[in-house]
Image: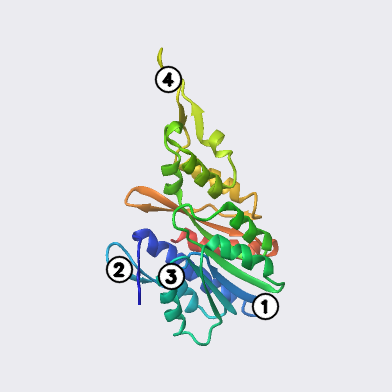
């Protein structure tokens, strides 16, 4: 099988959190009348080889090993990884599995409007860089059907949002607009510097640190979801690279879902 080479210590943490939540989620809803759907919008291959050489069961593999889901939707843009997912799915003939080779945003924009009543589920969002558009997150929230785990690319944002705003070119700005769903980050992240000399105009500098950026993302998510937990920040060494957010789109599910997720995150 093709293996997805990526990640480090944070990879194990996010996968452990997902594994524990899926198990608790399907147990909590096993006697309910809902059909349960698992969506993995950037599914990889089902296995992950970390940079340290460890081979882990990936998110798709974890979901397939969790009993209780009526249907699995795996989306992956890379054809070879899709082939690996297809091979993996053959080991689970008892499951209803749908594999889509394409952009996660495009596939979900087609799939979600056709989702019928009576479905509930978990959506795992682990994008490559800033690939996930805010419009897609909004569509997921609007279904009012999903609990969402979003591995937000914190380092991707502060790399694109250069310290000196003059270095944020049109492509970087467009990428941030798409990921954050607004242009307001310009005012939130940047202020005009009071420094300058006789020849240079004052520069516009980023004043938002990692805490402020993470807080801004949480504030944005709360405009879509009725419940958003404080994220688990994940590091590479001492460098913060991701914020693992949990959000609930179904209001009646908030008490149980947040209690389970908060417990898991507090011990991750």
Q: Is residue 136 above or below residue 202?
A: below
Sequence-earlier tag: 1 or 2: 1
Residue for badge 2: 54
Dot 4 falls on a residue whose secondary structure is loop
The one nearer the camera, 127 or 38, is: 127
Mark 1 sits on what residue? 32
Mark positioned earlier in the residue sequence (4 or 1):
1
Whole-number angstrom distance, CA of label 3 to CA of label 2: 24 Å
In the picture of the structure, the residue carrying the numbered disc 3 is 79
Q: CA distance from mark 1 to mark 3?
A: 37 Å
Q: CA separation, marks 4 and 3?
A: 51 Å
Label 3 CA crowd tier, 10 Å (few <14, some 14–19, many 20+): few
Q: Is residue 82 visible?
A: yes
The quadrant the C terminus occupies is bottom left
* The N terminus, quarter of image: bottom left
Q: Are marks 1 and 2 in contact (CB under 8 Å)?
A: no
Which residue is more in the foreground, 157 or 100?
Answer: 100
In this view, the mark in front (1 or 2) = 2
Secondary structure, mark 2, is loop
Q: Which residue is mark 4?
A: 195
- The total of numbered circles placed on residues is 4
| Cα separation between marks 4 and 1 | 62 Å
Q: Is residue 22 above or below residue 136?
A: below
Q: Earlier in the sequence, mark 1 or mark 3?
A: 1
Mark 1, secondary structure of its residue: loop
């Amino acid at each position: 099988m093709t293996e997805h080479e990526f990640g480090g210590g944070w990879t194990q943490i996010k996968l452990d959190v997902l594994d524990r939540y899926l198990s608790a989620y399907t147990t909590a809803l096993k006697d309910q009348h809902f059909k349960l759907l698992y969506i993995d919008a950037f599914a990889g291959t089902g296995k992950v080889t970390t940079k340290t050489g460890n081979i882990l069961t990936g998110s798709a593999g974890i979901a397939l090993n969790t009993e209780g889901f009526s249907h699995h939707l795996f989306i992956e843009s890379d054809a070879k990884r899709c082939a690996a997912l297809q091979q993996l799915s053959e080991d689970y003939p008892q499951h209803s599995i749908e594999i889509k080779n394409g952009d996660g945003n495009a596939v979900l924009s087609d799939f979600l409007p056709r989702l019928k009543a009576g479905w509930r589920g978990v959506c795992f969002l682990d994008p490559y860089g800033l690939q996930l558009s805010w419009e897609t997150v909004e569509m997921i929230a609007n279904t009012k059907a999903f609990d969402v785990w979003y591995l937000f690319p914190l380092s991707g944002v502060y790399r694109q949002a250069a310290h000196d705003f003059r270095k944020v070119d049109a492509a970087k700005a467009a990428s941030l607009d798409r990921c954050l769903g607004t242009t307001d980050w310009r005012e939130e992240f940047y202020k005009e510097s009071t420094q300058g000399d006789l020849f240079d105009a004052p520069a516009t500098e980023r004043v938002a640190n990692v805490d402020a950026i993470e807080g801004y993302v949480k504030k944005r998510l709360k405009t879509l979801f009725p419940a958003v937990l404080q994220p688990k920040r994940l590091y590479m060494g001492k460098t913060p690279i991701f914020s693992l957010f949990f959000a609930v789109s179904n209001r009646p599910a908030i008490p149980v879902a947040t209690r389970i997720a908060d417990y898991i995150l507090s011990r991750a």
